Image: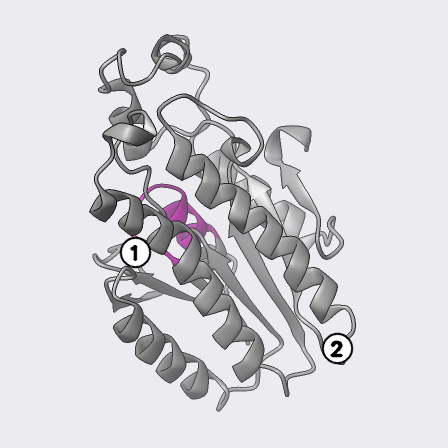
Amino acid sequence: MDIIIITGGSKGIGKALANKYATENYKVYSLARTSSDLENVTNITVDLSDLKKTENTFNALLNELLNFKITSITLINNAGRLGKISNLENLKPIDISKTIQLNTTTPIILSSLFIKITEQLSCKKQIINISSGAAKSPYQGWSIYCTSKAAIDMMTKAIATEQIEVENGVKCNAIYPGVVDTNMQSEIRNTNKADFNSLQRFVDLKENNELYTPEFVAETIYKVDTENQLKSGDIVDIRDF
């Protein structure tokens, strides 16, 4: 059995990934606050910003999956939030905390549990982190989002460094999906220009039909994954494929 666990699998890129892998006969689990309403996807309702419930839910799922004959198992850390767009001094501590928690702390915790609980499995095991070009390119108004994604990139490299030394180690990669036509992009375009000086660029991308569809991103990630195009620790942009 080939298993994919996707966080935030009910919307946007996560939903497109869930649908793509499900149609390719993977057993797909979506961890999200809402249901994906997709056939052949098991929806597990959990608020990923609640760390204790997330830990308990993920623990229970992985221990249940160990009862199956697994040929591959993958965790896709996809869930995330942009947070309020504005200069750092304008952000409330609670908003800063929520963004770091969902974008960075939750993926680190899930990755830790995934590595630990699957350590006896000798099949293909991997973590795919959905990162962002914002990890490398600072944007005015996105200080927390950029910071959280830079942390995900470093986590990816650190996990790969650790796991290469381990028997039956977990492969770990990060992927930049490009600028994708999702709710997050709508949120960006509705920002006040005073809070985000790159606003016009994102408006133009939409008006010129230059946004990727979630389905295109999912197809590309599936292809890169199943054709084994990456070595552990690679951080790539889908525009390079």
Secondary structure category for the residue under label 2: loop
Q: Secondary structure at mark 1?
A: loop
Rendering quarter of residue 198: top left
Specify start and end residues of the magenta stretch as a single range.
7-20
| Residue tagged 1 | 38
Examine the rendering and report whether any part of residue 131 can be seen.
Answer: yes
Q: Amino acid at mark 1?
A: Leu
Q: In the drawing, does residue 189 fall left or right of residue 68?
A: left
List the residue tagged with mark 2.
Answer: 166
Residue 4 at least partly seen: no
Mark nearer the viewer, 1 or 2: 2
Q: Tell me, what colour scheme is on the image?
A: one colour
- In the image, residue 98 sits, relative to residue 71, either above or below, namely above
Residue 89, quarter of the rendered image: top left
Q: Earlier in the sequence, mark 1 or mark 2?
A: 1
Where 196 sits versus 30, above or below? above
Question: Residue at horizontal 27%, vertical 59%?
Answer: 49
Q: Residue 84: horizontal and vertical position, in percent?
A: 25, 33
207 or 193: nearer the viewer: 193
Q: Is residue 31 left or right of residue 128?
A: left
Residue for point 56% across, 55% down: 128
Camera-side residue of 211 and 143: 143
Image quarter of the N terminus = bottom right
Residue 10 among magenta residues: yes
Instruction: Find the distance from the CA under tag 1 to the CA under tag 2.
Output: 36 Å
Which corner quadrant of the image does residue 187 belong to? top left
Please state the horizontal and vertical placement of residue 196, each as a whole percent of the image: 33, 17
Q: Residue at x 46, y 56 (%)?
A: 77
Q: Residue furthest bottom?
A: 67
